[in-house]
């Protein structure tokens, strides 16, 4: 009974217990919820920070990957250009060796022609001297004939001269006339010989001029070939993505030397021609993109034919590019 009123509520004591329980429970749950919300906010902030760091890390990783990819492409491009330039240098060296050999042959031919011209000139000078001597002799004989004719006229005027002296003078005159005729014939023969020598000398000079023109043409052809080669470098043949094998070919005296560097080797090693053929045949069976890089050093000691024959053999039998060209020719045929 409170304030003079009777409390008619049922379970009055239980309600008082419940009134004292629920406010405490509510306060506890409120604190728990606040702690939960505070922890959630902290976790969200932490997750946002971690997410930002993760994005920065991913961006940095992508930049690093892009830098690595760009560097790899630049390295591959530089390596490809280096291989192409080395191949170009090798081909130019072989062309230079061929032009050098042809120039030496032309110079030898020109030296021989000049030697022949010198001999012909010396023979012509000798013939000129002989001609001058015969001309002087002819003039002397002509003078003697004139004198003999004068003497004959004088003797004819002298009736008192003996017939024997007249006969002797006549014999001398006939002999002088015969000698004059013989001298005239010799002179004509010498003139014919001299004319033939002059023709031979003219022919030799013509051949020398032709040889000089051929040498000039060869030099022009070499210049044009060099220009055309620089313009017509076949870009289709590339070492990019191919199995590269390097072969260095030199000659010392009468002995040939082959240095080989395979796709897995770090340096060159000297091998025989048979071993080289076996290695290349094995790689050709294993790989269909074999790139054979033939290196002819500057002072290789090789002739053009030797360098070109070896290079052509390596390319035609093992290099992927020439194998594809041969396959295309077979398909066309």
Image (cartoon, rainbow, N blue to C red):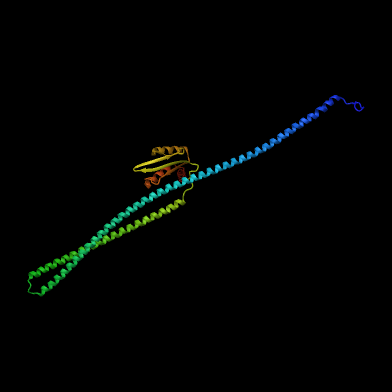
Q: Residue furthest right?
A: 4
Tell me the residue at 37%/51% (across/down): 100
With respect to residue 133, does 86 lie above or below?
above
Question: Where does residue 165 sit, x and y in percent of width and height?
Answer: 8, 69
Is 195 rendered above or below residue 324? below
Locate residue 269 relative to residue 38 in the image: left or right.
Answer: left
Say whether residue 169 is left or right of residue 239: left
**Position of residue 208 in the picture relative to residue 155 (left or right):** right
The percent position of residue 58, horizontal first and vertical second, equals: 61, 40
Q: Residue at x 43, y 52 (%)?
A: 226
Could you say where residue 97 lies in the image, as x and y percent from the top left? 38, 49
Residue 74: in sight, yes or no? Answer: yes
Q: Nearer the viewer, residue 283 or 182?
A: 283
Q: Quadrant of the N terminus?
A: top right
| Image x and y of residue 279, in percent | 43, 37
Q: Nearer the viewer, residue 290 or 111?
A: 111
Residue 189 in sight in this render:
no
């Amino acid at each position: 009974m409170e304030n003079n009123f009777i409390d008619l509520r049922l379970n009055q004591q239980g309600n008082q217990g419940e009134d004292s329980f629920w406010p405490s429970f509510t306060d506890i749950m409120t604190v728990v919820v606040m702690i939960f919300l505070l922890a959630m906010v902290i976790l969200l902030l932490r997750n946002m920070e971690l997410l930002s760091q993760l994005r920065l890390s991913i961006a940095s990783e992508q930049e690093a990957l892009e830098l690595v990819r760009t560097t790899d492409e630049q390295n591959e491009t530089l390596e490809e250009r280096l291989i192409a330039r080395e191949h170009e240098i090798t081909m130019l060296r072989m062309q230079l060796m061929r032009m050098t050999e042809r120039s030496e042959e032309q110079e030898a031919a020109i030296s021989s022609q000049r030697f022949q011209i010198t001999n012909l000139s010396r023979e012509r000078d000798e013939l000129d001297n002989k001609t001058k001597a015969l001309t002087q002799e002819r003039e002397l004989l002509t003078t003697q004939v004139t004198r003999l004719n004068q003497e004959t006229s004088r003797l004819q005027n002298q009736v008192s001269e003996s017939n024997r002296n007249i006969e002797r003078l006549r014999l001398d005159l006939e002999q002088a006339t015969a000698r004059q005729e013989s001298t005239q014939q010799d002179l004509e023969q010498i003139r014919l010989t001299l004319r033939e020598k002059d023709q031979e000398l003219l022919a030799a000079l013509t051949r020398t001029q032709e040889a000089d023109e051929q040498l000039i043409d060869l030099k022009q052809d070499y210049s044009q070939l060099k220009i055309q080669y620089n313009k017509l470098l076949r870009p289709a043949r590339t070492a990019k993505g191919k199995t590269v094998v390097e072969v260095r070919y030199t000659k010392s005296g009468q002995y040939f030397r082959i240095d080989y560097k395979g796709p897995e080797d770090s340096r060159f090693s000297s091998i025989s021609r048979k071993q080289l053929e076996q290695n290349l045949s094995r790689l050709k069976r294993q790989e269909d993109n074999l790139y054979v890089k033939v290196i002819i050093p500057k002072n290789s000691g090789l002739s053009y034919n030797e360098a070109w024959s070896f290079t052509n053999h390596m390319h035609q039998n093992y290099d992927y590019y020439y194998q594809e060209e041969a396959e295309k020719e077979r398909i066309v045929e």
